[in-house]
Structures are given as structure tokens and as C-alpha cells.
Image (cartoon, grey):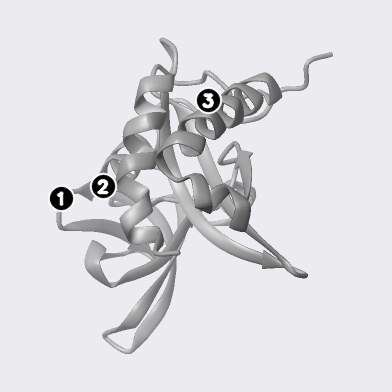
Amino acid sequence: MDIKKLQPPIERQLGLLGFELVFLEAAKEGRDSILRLYVDHLDRGPQGDKAVTLDDCVAVNDGLIAWMDVEFPSLREEIGLEISSPGLERPLTKPEHYRRFAGHLCRIQTQSPINGQKKFKGWIGESTDEAVALEEDGSLKTIPFDVIQKARLAPFDEGKTPKPRLVAPATTHKTAGVEKSAD
């Protein structure tokens, strides 16, 4: 299964269901192959805080299974589908994610070193379609998106990391993407 070929049609179908694909990964659990999708609402609410619920995950699962049975019938026999919210330590995979979470702390790992460094933890600054500015230890670093291997928000480290001096802090300390239980 080639995830890169599968991602665009899945993104289109999720869009029709009212969701955005945040991250897609193939995983192996024992003998089972799993296609894991982290999704978020396209309409995040007025504060950007509309959480992905268990009911949302079930709706996405049902909508994708019906579609996959038509578009990729053999795939469903080979692989299981798992739908999840991105969570607090959500992956950052698109330039829009960095813009949305400007002023928040994140961890980035690059494929190749930038000035001898592959792991970064800093405050998200401005981003273009090509790169993101990250304030780490009081200095501004530019990280091109094409060398980022993985990146995630780091909300649990925000309180113990010196506040940014060069990057504007997030205007509200909202918990976007936090799961809320149904009870």
C-alpha cells in the first residue's frame, strides 16, 4: 500500500464528510496492518476549539468504510481502519497547522541536520509555504518544511520552557483539539 497515493483521495473524501486529515500513517500491530487517520473538523467553531469526539470518529469511520468498499475494495480486506483525534500533542504536517498554532511550543525533528542540529523545541513564529520560524533558546531559527521529518505541539512543556522574546505568544491559551468525554 502506497500511502502517498492513498492520501489525496482520502483527504477529498474526508472534506466531503466535514473533516480535515491531520496525519496519516500505516502501522503494524502483530499480524494486523492498520491505516491510522488523525482528523480534525474543517469547521472548528468560532474559537477554533471544536473538539473531535468519539461520535465524530465513528461517523468518519462509517463514511470512509462505505466509500473505501467502492473505491478500494481489496484494501479493506488487507488493512484495518483506525480514526482518532489529533490530541493535545497533535502532529503538525502542513503550513496551515503552523500558522494556526503560532505562539505555541512545538518539537520538530528534521531528516538532515540544520547547522548541526536535528531536534528542535521552540515557539512557533511566522511561517510561509516553504518554512517556519521557531524561537529556540532566545534565537530565531528557520526550518524548511521539506526537511521536517516529524513535528508535534508540546503543550505539557509550555509552563517549564522560558517564554518567547522574539515570537508573539499565543493570544489565547485554548485547548484546541482536546477530546471531551460524552458524560
Residue identified by numbered label 1: 129
How far apart are labels 1 and 3 at the CA level?
A: 31 Å
Residue 142 visible, this orientation: no
Residue kind at label 2, given as amino acid type: Pro
Taking 154 as reference, is 118 left or right? left
Location of residue 130 (image quadrant):
bottom left
Any mark on residue 90, and which?
none
| CB within 8 Å, label 3 to label 2 | no
- Which of the two labelled residues, at mark 3 and mark 2, occupies the earlier sequence position? 3
Q: Is residue 146 above or below residue 172?
A: below
Any mark on residue 63, and which?
3
Taking the spot 51% from the left edge, 20% from the top edge, the residue there is 49
Disc number lying in front (1 or 3): 3
Task: Spot the residue most to the right.
Answer: 183
Q: Is residue 177 above or below residue 33?
A: above
Any mark on residue 95, and which?
2
Taking the spot 36% from the left edge, 75% from the top edge, the residue there is 110
Taking 33 as reference, is 99 left or right? left
Viewer-proximal residue among 76 and 183:
76
| CB within 8 Å, label 2 to label 1 | yes
Disc number lying in front (3 or 2): 3
Task: Spot the residue most to the top.
Answer: 46
